């Protein structure tokens, strides 16, 4: 690998925590003059996938500082409870695992024999907004990203419509600007962009190739671009197989004598 294992883990976890082709859903076109933010959120929420568990086989390409790294593995989601991810190198070499719950996240790096853990408090203090478990779950499932239950306070919003018939919901809160592009027929998210006014931090998430899996509409391809201090990191995630509401385990055990690092 061209970047250290520790750095790779930090990049993946941080980007996930910040953690389209339109679907085939047919819906009546809404006149922009008669729709407000709450209505748009409701329409988008109505097409969110409903599930108890999601099992995903994925592959991912990470590009940063001229280097490119490929990983694959599995993602297991217990809705509103836990996200389990394992990371493999080529030939099935197990690099590590991550377990994210509502209150904390844990990462085991098998290559470096290290264990990381921490809460989302630091992320919230640094960014001034709720980048947490639910936002990560929403990004992976293309669920509407800013419902009222986790929406930042002190925000303002504007709704525009493009010539291609898309809604763009712009929200300003604290030191941040958020743009969500929504297809006006399917009401699925096409693109999400978050930028910080007082710093070069910018995150863009794009969704491609929505699939109908047992009546649930889920993205097959997610592209994440992270800009920070003139460094661009690109992550492209491909969902190779998706199963819904199947029983599975989320094994997570920290081997003895691993170095423990708390991310405060």
Image (cartoon, rainbow, N blue to C red):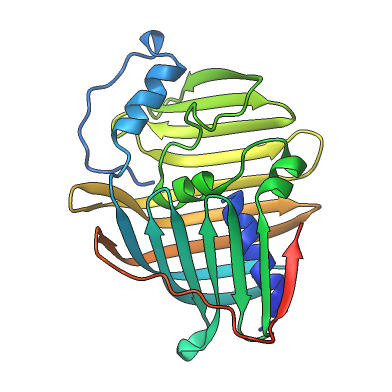
- Which of 120 and 190 lies nearest the eye of the viewer? 120
Q: Nearer the viewer, residue 163 or 66?
A: 66
Q: Quadrant of residue 48?
A: top left
**Residue at horizontal 46%, vertical 18%?**
37
Left or right, residue 234 beside residue 219: right
Q: Position of residue 92 (x, y in %)?
A: 46, 88
Residue 234 can be seen in this image: no
Residue that sits furthest to the top in the current view: 33
Q: Is residue 216 left or right of residue 191?
A: left
Q: Residue furthest front?
A: 256
Residue 50 occupies quadrant: top left
State the residue at coordinates (67%, 26%). 173
Lateral position of residue 76 relative to residue 8, left or right: left
Residue 251 placed where, x, y %?
44, 74
Position above or below: 39 against 10: above
Q: Is residue 167 above or below residue 52?
A: above
**Image label count:** 0
Q: Which residue is at 65% across, 24% downward?
A: 172
In the rendered image, residue 232, in percent from the top left (x then y), is placed at 70, 57
On-image quarter of the C terminus = bottom right
Q: Looking at this view, is 64 or 10 the one in front?
A: 10
Q: In this view of the protein, which residue sits in the foreground, 113 or 90?
A: 113
């Amino acid at each position: 690998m061209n970047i250290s294992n520790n750095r790779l883990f930090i990049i993946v976890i941080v980007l996930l925590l910040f953690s389209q082709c339109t679907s085939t859903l047919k819906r009546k076109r809404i006149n922009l003059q008669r729709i407000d933010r709450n209505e748009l959120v409701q329409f988008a929420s109505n097409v969110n996938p409903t599930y108890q568990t999601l099992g995903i086989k994925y592959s991912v390409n990470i590009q940063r500082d001229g280097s490119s790294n490929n990983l694959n593995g599995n993602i297991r989601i217990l809705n509103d409870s836990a996200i389990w991810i394992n990371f493999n190198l080529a030939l099935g070499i197990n690099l590590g695992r991550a377990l994210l719950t509502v209150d904390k996240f844990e990462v085991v790096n098998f290559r470096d024999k290290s264990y990381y853990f921490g809460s989302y408090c630091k992320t919230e203090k640094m960014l001034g907004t709720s980048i947490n478990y639910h936002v990560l779950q929403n990004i992976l499932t293309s669920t509407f990203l800013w419902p009222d239950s986790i929406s930042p306070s002190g925000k303002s919003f504007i709704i525009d419509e493009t010539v291609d018939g898309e809604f763009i919901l712009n929200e300003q809160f604290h030191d941040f600007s958020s743009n969500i592009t929504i297809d006006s027929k399917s009401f699925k998210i096409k693109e999400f962009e978050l930028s910080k006014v007082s710093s070069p931090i910018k995150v863009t998430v794009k969704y491609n190739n929505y699939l109908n899996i047992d009546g649930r509409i889920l993205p097959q391809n997610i592209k994440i671009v992270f800009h920070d201090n003139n460094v661009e990191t690109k992550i492209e995630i491909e969902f190779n197989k998706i199963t819904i509401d199947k029983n599975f385990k989320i094994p997570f055990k920290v081997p003895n004598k691993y170095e423990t690092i708390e991310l405060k």
